[in-house]
Image (cartoon, rainbow, N blue to C red):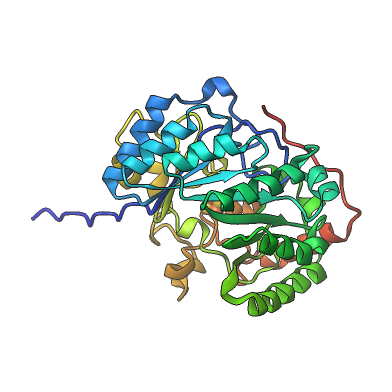
Amino acid sequence: MNQIAPRIAPPFAVMAELTHRCPLQCPYCSNPLEMLKARAERDTAFWRGVIREAAEMGVLQIHFSGGEPTLRSDLAELIAYATEQGLYANLITSAVLLNEDKLASYAQAGLGHVQISLQGADAETADHIGHYTGAHKKKLEVAKLVTKLGLSLTINAVVHRQNLEQLPRIIDLALQLDADRLEIAHVQYHGWAFANRAALMPTRAQFEAANALVDARREDIGARMQIDYVVPDYYADLPKTCMGGWGQKMLNIAPDGRVLPCHAAETIPGLVFSRADELPLSEIWEGGHAFNKFRGTSWMQEPCSSCALKEVDWGGCRCQAMAITGDAAATDPVCSRSPRHDAMNAMAAAEAQGAPHEFKWRRIL
Ligand code: FES
């Protein structure tokens, strides 16, 4: 008797990377080193098709991201269509290209939430890190417009060796901006961040001070503002559940229409990615080569395969295992059971002690 394979639950969210173009040049950008030019981007009809299929699959949220998604002149139309299809729309933006009219058009279209990145607590630091004069001032103005329009606001602060001393002021700033949520994320070393690792790696003392600060501020801020905290992998002992588990919660669509299990998946050699106009999105999600390569636990090696936490962290980050060990199926070296764990810690400590390097800037507009 033929057995029917259990149906794979749909992703919770779709990350729509509408473009790799961006006016900022953050040295920790998660976009690939080889970024796609505007001519490779897909048109409005393509993205409407993605939105319709995502809604039919049961996806609940769509994150419009990039690069800088507000560079797309069809963004309001895409937000409106996503809302019409029943998806909750979130905008992930640097905010530097926004003004009140543009933001109001997105709100009118049904946008529910805006996430604005801050590169520091003051203009001198933040504008240097984003390599864009005037960015910080503009971000603060736009953040105030977000709350004025009644939209939910998340402030995203990526922290590293060159701005961690500003963390107390970043938390105060998010409170002043009346953010619903502050995401403090230590740099995750993919894409441009991997190329700039020696310039960004915090010292262990910085890392421990940040942990203590976040614990204390969470306690006194309470329900007034949610603080989410992403620790730096290289100093952790347990791997994070990257992407909520490979092929389990999210899918990414690159600006050229390729459907990826995560934003960095193309750094893993041998994976086959389909485009969302070649096959139905549900078919790519359920049967696609790249999605099934590291889904579940059957691909795991020791020590992951016998680990009690294998269905908690799902083996950690495949892209990081690839970058550090050269084997995407290896145990994420963040895990203290990985044979590469001590070497990874030692590398982080050595890089953090050196003089801060110049950043290698990303550039595409
Ligand atoms: Fe790709 Fe973690 S970034 S699995």
Q: Quadrant of residue 188?
A: bottom right
Find the residue positioned furthest to the right.
Answer: 355
- Toward the viewer: 94 or 3? 94
Find the residue positioned furthest to the top.
Answer: 39
Whether residue 25 is situated above or below residue 311 in the rendered picture = above
Q: In this view of the protein, can residue 343 be seen by the observer? A: no
Residue 341: % across, % down: 67, 66
Residue 197: % across, % down: 76, 50
Q: Residue at x 81, y 65 (%)?
A: 203
Q: Quadrant of the N terminus?
A: bottom left
- Toward the viewer: 323 or 210? 210
Residue 223: % across, % down: 56, 74
Find the residue positioned furthest to the left.
Answer: 1
Q: Quadrant of the C terminus?
A: top right
Q: Residue at x 49, y 29 (%)?
A: 256
Whether residue 329 is situated above or below residue 270 in the rendered picture = below
- Toward the viewer: 211 or 330? 211
Q: In this view of the protein, can residue 225 be seen by the observer? A: yes
Q: Residue at x 45, y 61 (%)?
A: 300
Residue 100: % across, % down: 60, 39
